[in-house]
Amino acid sequence: MDIHVSSLFPEILAMIFNYLDVKGKGRVAQVCTAWRDASYHKSVWRGVEAKLHLRRANPSLFPSLQTRGIKKVQILSLRRSLSYVIQGMPNIESLNLSGCYNLTDNGLGHAFVQDIPSLRVLNLSLCKQITDSSLGRIAQYLKKLELLDLGGCSNITNTGLLLIAWGLHNLKSLNLRSCRHVSDVGIGHLAGMTRSAAEGCLSLEHLTLQDCQKLTDLSLKHISKGLNKLKVLNLSFCGGISDAGMIHLSHKTHLWTLNLRSCDNISDTGIMHLSMGALRLYGLDVSFCDKVGDQSLAYIAQGLYQLKSLSLCSCHISDDGINRMVRQMHELKTLNIGQCVRITDKGLELIADHLTQLTGIDLYGCTKITKRGLERITQLPCLKVLNLGLWQMTEVKGLGDASEILPCYTS
Amino acid sequence: MPTIKLQSSDGEMFEVDVEIAKQSVTIKTMLEGKWYTGVDRWVTPPNVSSLICPQVIQWCTHHKDDPPPPEDDENKEKRTDDIPVWDQEFLKVDQGTLFELILAANYLDIKGLLDVTCKTVANMIKGKTPEEIRKTFNIKNDFTEEEEAQVKQVPFTLWHKKK
């Protein structure tokens, strides 16, 4: 006698439902009572983030999240108050309010009125009305926070960072993109330089300071002294950073990824400092640093040869620089040299001959390369992605004739 | 090469290489157990019939050199489009056999086999309405009107899995 699906006990049904998308998980609940009950298993909803429009009061909403053990929520539009959400989800672990432009200090203040020890992740990016006052609330009641995203919250000042440094000792990831009032003083707070007032966020592993235009090399000094667990540092568009700042960073042996995109003052000298220190970087991005040239590639080959990802888009490099680098960079998997207009087929041949582990390469805007060079590149054994367009990536599978993928390049 | 015997629920005996059988964590644990000294060793998984046993053995034999399956990462997207071609062919069986394989893999704790069989069933569910699912698996709708309305009320269409 054939076994029927009803022989599969609830734990097994839950395992199967785990493979469905959220809509599917909802639909199976409507099949029969046994499937409904199995679909409520918390294992089915592990890791799921509920995305909610809070238009009208739905009394079954929070209980249904609770039954399924869902603890991550993104609010798509904040029509009702935030306190409605916090009250409905006392064990919330992750709250994503990205883009809720109508969230005010007031609203946040009414919502966070007591300790919420379960909350680990808070995303307030583009909540443009938020000020330091909210950070005070956050520092007081969300002490277990590990990730805080304040990207685009341009009202934040150094005072806000002092509050963060005072209250959020578990913070591992902080995003301050475009928080333009932030200056070296604020970074000092984070790094524990104001020990009498605030211990600092010494557990920080990811720090994004993109577009914090007021920062100077002094910030990097603070970072090098205080943030000893930092793995990923994004300083893109920080126009105040210079080569001298790289000396401070060169001591940070645990730094994995450094983003210096569009840091106009960075030149070959800065790259030299990075290469001569104790850094073991895996990823470096100096795209649009137009003072970076072939000499930098020589330095990188000497001191940063373990790099897995290197971006030099729009830098003043030539085939000569490629030549100086390729024989040492055995681990390189991603190379972005888009808009490097001096690169020719000769450079591509060098890459094709030596960078055998390469899985992705960006050659958009390399106007001197031809079909010949590209054919060599497409022969790289591990290559999966070849970018030749501004926004598109071409997947390279079962590599065929180069002219199929690149009609615009003629020999 | 040392072997172990599997006795199916209907009494038949199947002999398997120990190394192949060890893909079953259940069997592996038994073999490493302190009380295990006998030469004549066998395992009797319940509900694993003499028709399913050889199929399980066949799967394990084909996968004997596979690396151990990775730990489940709750944040990783769960895919169902990555079932290896051999497994896809192997699993072109009737539903009854498929469910028996799931139960056997579950009892014998063979993660790889459990994963691909569950993925296969998930693929049979994907994209179908509740009524279509009932037809596919010959399931009776045992909801009362009230229960059915309640289940439909939750706004699932607003929820998407985190990318």
Image (tube, grey):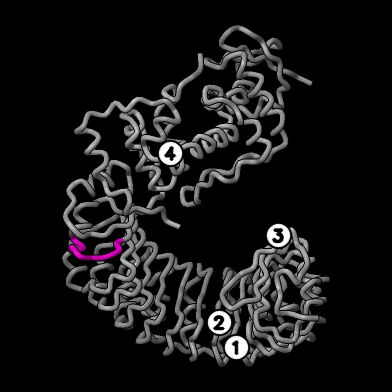
Q: Which residue is mark 2?
A: A260
Q: Earlier in the sequence, mark 4 or mark 3?
A: 4
Of the pair B85 and A152, the residue shown nearer to us: B85
Q: CA distance from mark 1 to mark 3?
A: 33 Å
Q: Secondary structure at mark 2?
A: loop
- Please state if A360 lies on the left or on the right of A221 as rendered: right
Which of the labelled discs sits on residue A17, or is there none? 4
Q: CA distance from mark 2 to mark 3?
A: 32 Å
Q: Which residue is mark 3?
A: A397
Q: CA distance from mark 2 to mark 4?
A: 44 Å
Q: Secondary structure at mark 4?
A: helix
Q: What amino acid is at disc 4?
A: Phe
Residue B116 point in image, percent of width and height: 57, 36
Which of the labelled discs sits on residue A289, or is there none? 1
Relative vertical location of residue A74 with respect to residue A9 in this rendering, above or below? below
> Which contiguous range is marked in magenta?
A75-83
Q: Are marks 4 and 3 on the same chain?
A: yes
Q: Chain of mark 3?
A: A
- Please state if A47 lies on the left or on the right of A259 as rendered: left
Residue A262 point in image, percent of width and height: 54, 86
**How many residues crowd around disc 4 within 10 Å: few (fewer than 14), some, or many (20 or more)?**
many
Q: CA distance from mark 4 to mark 1?
A: 49 Å
Q: What amino acid is at disc 3?
A: Lys
**How many residues crowd around disc 2 within 10 Å: few (fewer than 14), some, or many (20 or more)?**
many
Q: Chain of mark 2?
A: A
